Image (cartoon, rainbow, N blue to C red):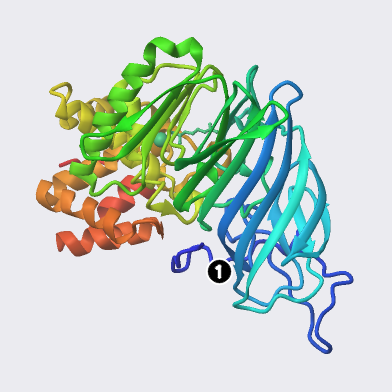
Amino acid sequence: ATTASPGAVATAAPSAKAVATPGTAVTPAGKPPTVGAPGIGDPDFPFDGNGGYDVRHYTLKLSYDPATRRLAGSAIVKAKAVQDLDAFNLDLRGLRVDRVTVDGTPAGFRREGDELVIQPAARIAKGARFTVQVDYGGEPQPIREDASLGVYGFIATTDGSFVTNEPNGAKTWFPSNDHPADKATFTFEITVPDGVTAIANGELVAERKAGDGKKTFVWRERHPMATYLATMMTGKFEVRTGTTGKGIPIYTAVDPAFRGSLGYLYEETKRLTDHWTTVFGPYPFSSTGGVIDNFTAGYALEVQTKPVYGGFVPRTGTIAHELAHQWFGNSVTIARWRDLWLNEGFATYAEWLWSEHRGEATTDQIFRQYYTQASDQIWRHPPAVARPNNLFHASVYKRGAMTLHVLRRTIGDEKFFRLIREWTGANRHGNVTTEQFIRLAEEISGKRLQELFDAWLYQPGRPAQVP
Ligand code: ARG
Ligand code: ZN
């Protein structure tokens, strides 16, 4: 469900180009048809997500056969209308849709690019809760965006699937409101051949025989989650579970090729999850963990409750980074992609904090090194305006982290760490913008910080003033 984020997502409707036309939908006599927008209102990603409703819960009942690469099943989406709806969209890329129902009644539907346009038999009234079921299947294809994002979405591997959606790859495997501004809880019921393990977000609540040489894994994520953090990792895995010192359940898994690193992944995940609770505030979810698959993605993703490492054994700094995202990004979630530095700047700064905590390079040393040696790329490109074709630019990470360090030196450690805990506490499971962070920093420090943030986040060029 969407958390109100002033001015961010509710306004700025995208171009009306692909707006669903209501066609033959039955509309109350005399009232013009009213349709949900094909985008949620992110100015940089105009067709990501959709308008007109808030998703509350996704139930994904899916079977996947690694041998045929076929995914099939149903997505059951519970939502609440925020306007009258004669038609509305879900995001879905590829795959074949067989049937759509709304509150149990068959609905009309058609495909327009990556939009699934749905026409319920009767208008859904503003404020009403409704349930959409989409029966679908096919061979999911990941998105290949060579310029900067690489390959993401549902990726078939030799023994299963490697699934990392950031930024908008959820639509490659389930119909969704595919934008972080609409978070929802999830249930996964994933059926795979015997001998294959299915891993998703949250906790494993059941494992049962499905007949026909198959098994169903039921996972539940009971805290709100952005679609880009959903996963279904399937394949052969070695698993180790337990509880952290602070009592947080932990689930780690590695592809057999990484067998020797399962103990390391488990121990590092355990101690870093606990460590971050002492710095960032209470852990926001019901479990922690991590998965190493042997698909070489070239990156890791902070999948909610279980970061995924694509084909490599992560450095302890990388585990620190992905687990920091559980607070910054996963619990406190951006309302629009241009604010991505709120995820990556914090997670990168967490790596610096971890280095300092372990008695290695201090945050001051790491800052100075970047300040004096960072490439021109970082100075040319301000971090708080992440662009679709360059979302994961080094500046978003490094200059984002440098901004936090400058802020810390300007307002002092006591206020800085209080600010961080306020930020994660007040916005727990919510959506945020950079403007909100600046406001809170000014409030807690009692200082005017516009100039600092302007120079570090919004202007090209290397800021001259460093504390
Ligand atoms: N958020 C990830 C991290 O910094 C990076 C994800 C990269 N995604 C991609 N499609 N290239 O930990
Ligand atoms: Zn990151």
In the rendered view, does 268 fall on the left or right side of 18?
left
Query: Which residue shows up at 38% across the image and 50% down it?
Result: 331
In the image, residue 133 above or below residue 23: above
In the rendered view, does 215 fall on the left or right side of 237?
right
Looking at this view, name the residue that lies furthest to the right.
24
Residue type at the position of mark 1: Thr
Q: Quadrant of residue 409?
A: top left
Q: Is residue 459 visible?
A: no
Looking at this view, name the residue that lies furthest to the bottom.
30
Q: Quadrant of the C terminus?
A: top left
Q: Where's residue 38, x and y in %?
A: 69, 60
Query: Which residue shows up at 67% across the image and 79% down it?
Result: 125
In the rendered view, does 163 fall on the left or right side of 261?
right
Q: Quadrant of residue 163?
A: top right
Query: Which residue shows up at 16% across the image and 21% down it?
Result: 360
Front residue of 325 and 131: 131
Q: Quadrant of residue 441?
A: bottom left
Q: Where's residue 296, x and y in %?
A: 54, 18
Q: How many marks?
A: 1
In the image, residue 113 above or below residue 65: below
Q: Where's residue 211, x and y in %?
A: 69, 32
Q: Is residue 134 visible?
A: yes
Q: Where's residue 240, x and y in %?
A: 38, 24
Q: Disc 1 designates what residue?
A: 11
